[in-house]
Image (tube, helix red, strand yellow):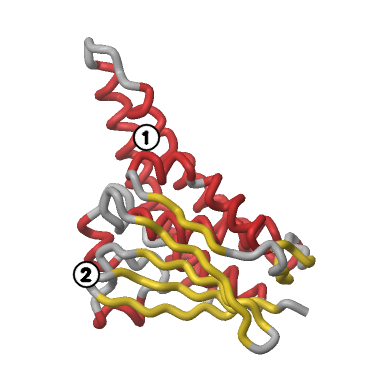
Amino acid sequence: RLEQENEHYKIVMSKWVHQMKTPLSVLDLMTQEKQLIPSADIREETGRMEYLLNQILHLIRMENLKNDFMVERCQLVALVKSAINEQKNYFIQNEVFPKLDIRDSVYVYTDKKWFAFAMQQFLNNAVKYSDSGQSIQLTAKYESNKAVLKIQDFGSGICLEEQSRIFDFCYTGSNGRKKQKESSGLGLYLAKNILDYLGHEIRMTSEQGKGTIFQIYMQTD
């Protein structure tokens, strides 16, 4: 088991270093240009680095997750707005727009910090595989004693053959390989592990060319 975990970390670090080299190389090319560099371009590359750094830091911290989380009653719409705000620049850069329809009265039990990070992974993926001008819809409903948060995009979708592997360690799939400079294969793996630990069920449906829906089931009492 230890040998397997060690091999996993080698793979992660190799992929992470490769991912970090891309925005650094872009920034280096920018600084070599004689013309003025648009601040939006710099923000895009530094934002990509910050996102990748956060992924690797949370991967490391997950080893000690049981000592670093606190479940409490939280207003769902506030949690979702916070996650959207963290990805605000990414939404703007890609001209994809969040549409939020969650009542203020919906409360759930979760850990604010870890849930927010998991949400950011789903939002980042939704934006990444959507076209300019499309929207990401976030809604909530009650089912029995649970609240169900739905995250729906209308982007490229996931082919049927790959759907069972999307939460696998470092799996990028055909969509991720098309956007190789942005896909680490860690986001959904981390999100699924966090939600499992918090006791939140996650379900996914997708149709290639029409988009993807993630539904997160959370305790309300």
Q: Which residue is mark 2?
A: 209
Residue 64: percent from left, percent from top = 68, 62
Question: Which mark's residue is nearer the viewer, 1 or 2?
Answer: 2
Label 2 environment density (alpha carbons within 10 Å; few <14, some 14–19, many ≥20): few
Q: Residue 154 or 169: which is nearer the viewer?
A: 154
Q: Quadrant of residue 45?
A: top left
- The residue shown at (42%, 78%) is 204
On screen, residue 17 above or below 121: above
Q: Could you tell whether 192 is left or right of 30 in the image?
A: right
Q: Residue at x 35, y 71 (%)?
A: 212
Give the total of numbered labels. 2
User: Closer to the N terminus: mark 1 or mark 2?
Assistant: 1
Between 194 and 104, the residue placed more toward the observer is: 104
Looking at the rendered structure, the secondary structure element under dot 2 is: loop
Q: Where the C terminus falls, by quadrant?
A: bottom right
Query: Which amino acid type is shown beneath numbered disc 2?
Result: Gly
Q: Residue furthest bottom?
A: 144
* Image-based side of 1 in relation to 165, left or right: right
Q: Residues within 10 Å of mark 1 (few under 14, many from 20)?
A: some
The label number, if any, that marks residue 45 in the structure image: 1
Where does residue 188 sit, x and y in percent of width and height?
A: 45, 66
Cα–Cα gap, marks 1 and 2: 28 Å
Compared across the picture, whether 219 is left or right of 98 comes to right
Foreground: 209 or 54? 209
Amino acid bearing label 1: Glu
**Label at residue 139:** none
Residue at image location 57% in from the left, 52% down from the top: 83
